[in-house]
Amino acid sequence: MFQHVQPYAGDPIFALVDAFNADARPHKVNLSIGIYFDEQGRLPVLDSVRGAEALILAAGGAKPYLPMEGDARMRTEVQKLLLGAGHPAIAAQRVATIQGVGSSGGLKIGADFLRTWLPDSQVWVSDPTWDNHRSMFEGSGFVVNTYPYYDAASGGVRFEAMLQALRGLPARSIVLLHACCHNPTGVDLTREQWQALVPVLRERELLAYLDLAYQGFGDGIAEDAYAVRALADAGLTFFVANSFSKSMSVYGERCGALTAVCADAAEAALVLGQLRYTVRRVYSSPPLHAAQIVAHVLGDAELRGMWEGELAAMRERIAAMRRALHDRLVQRLPGRDFSYFLTQRGMFSYTGLSAAQVDRLREEHAVYLIRSGRICVAGLNLGNVERVAEAMAAVMSTR
Ligand code: KET
């Protein structure tokens, strides 16, 4: 029956984590997967999340099904977090949100919905992007193309080439955009560039699909939602999948959502209906615990304040690690430009290391990163940054 099934080579990110876990060298360093580790190298449990879980337990712990679209309080809080409380799009009821199974679940439900309702469209992702974007949209039956994004020469965005590519797309093309903290490069559009993108999206009738997986890890909660708010302010119709995996350190709980900002309330109701139906056909309804955590952390004033402080601390520690790695590399390899570590945003940095250099880092130095040269800066701490800088300098100086 299944002898024709093709072997699965494994996911490059998860496979690297497995290899790291199996590595017996005590000095090994994990800079692979996008997970925030604290200064002690531990996966933190936030006090705000512990507080939410205490409230959930105290409430008695009944476990009913959630509706297909998820928990109402969670969905309302997500809209306020993305758009800002009191955004006119929310008041106009032109925003439809479903709870996801992580942001991946939201992305995928959105992809299935779009495949049904925009069957002639193709998808365009940044070059490069998170590998799973392509897999997910191809899995939904889309042809996935790339638009120019990262400029290796300058370490910036090829913005003119990007705009030109988008200007040439057919109407209703789906354009996947990283709202902040671009994965894998750490290089984001500026506010001016987002504003320059808006008329192109509108005039070419493109559907922006924002991925907001790292809200709060760039410059702040509201700051990192700039793109979402800019598109909503401009009256565009667009999708945004957002994640709490990183921002609340709740990876395995699968906390996330999908939001469609629509033209008006009637359209939002239609979209919500079909998103619910898509959910019903795939996994029926989302996880209860995830919804309750997010609803409490965002909605209870005390927990919210606590969370904002904890998120700021994570953001600041990552920024400090960027500086620490930068300074140590500059010391070791004077004359080279490492300023990209300081200007890139979020958990990731694109180091420019070749796949061969990445292999040497892993094999000779027990430093694990993705073969694209992406490092997860949140895996650095004061106990390992020296060693990582030394190892990087060693492989960089023998190109
Ligand atoms: N979008 C982006 C851009 C992203 O980097 C991730 C995860 C997700 C969505 C999925 O998040 P979640 O809400 O947990 O479903 N990225 C890291 C982990 C992974 O590959 O799954 C990573 O790039 O390492």
Image: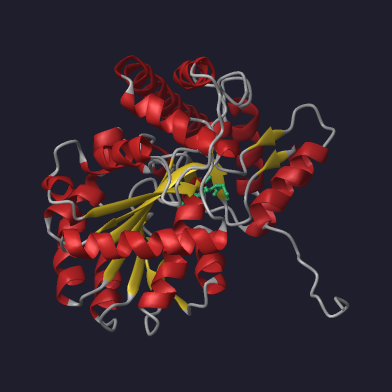
Q: Residue at x 58, y 57 (%)?
A: 372
220 and 360: which one is in front?
220
Q: Can you see residue 356? A: yes
> Residue at coordinates 64% horizontally, 51% vertically from top-left?
13
Name the spot of residue 295 as percent of width and height, x first. 39, 31
Residue 257 in the image: x percent, y percent? 41, 47
Asked if one can make out residue 332 in the rendered structure from this viewpoint, the answer is: no
Report the side of 375 relative to 361 (left or right): left
Quarter of the image with the N terminus is bottom right
Image quadrant where one finds the C terminus: bottom right
80 vs 324, nearest the viewer: 80
> How many marks are shown on the rendered structure?
0
Q: From the viewer's side, name the closer residue of 12 and 190.
A: 12
Against 148, is 73 above or below?
above
In the image, what residue occupies the spot 21% across and 75% down? Answer: 205
Q: Is residue 93 above or below residue 387?
A: below
Q: How is the image coloured?
A: secondary structure
Above or below for 120 versus 308: below
Residue 388, x across and y down, in percent: 63, 33
Could you tell me which residue is drawn at 19 percent across and 63 percent down?
A: 266
Q: Judge from the rendering whether residue 380 lies leftward or rightward of residue 195; answer left or right.
A: right
Q: Quadrant of residue 340?
A: top left
Q: Position of residue 267 (x, y in %)?
A: 22, 65
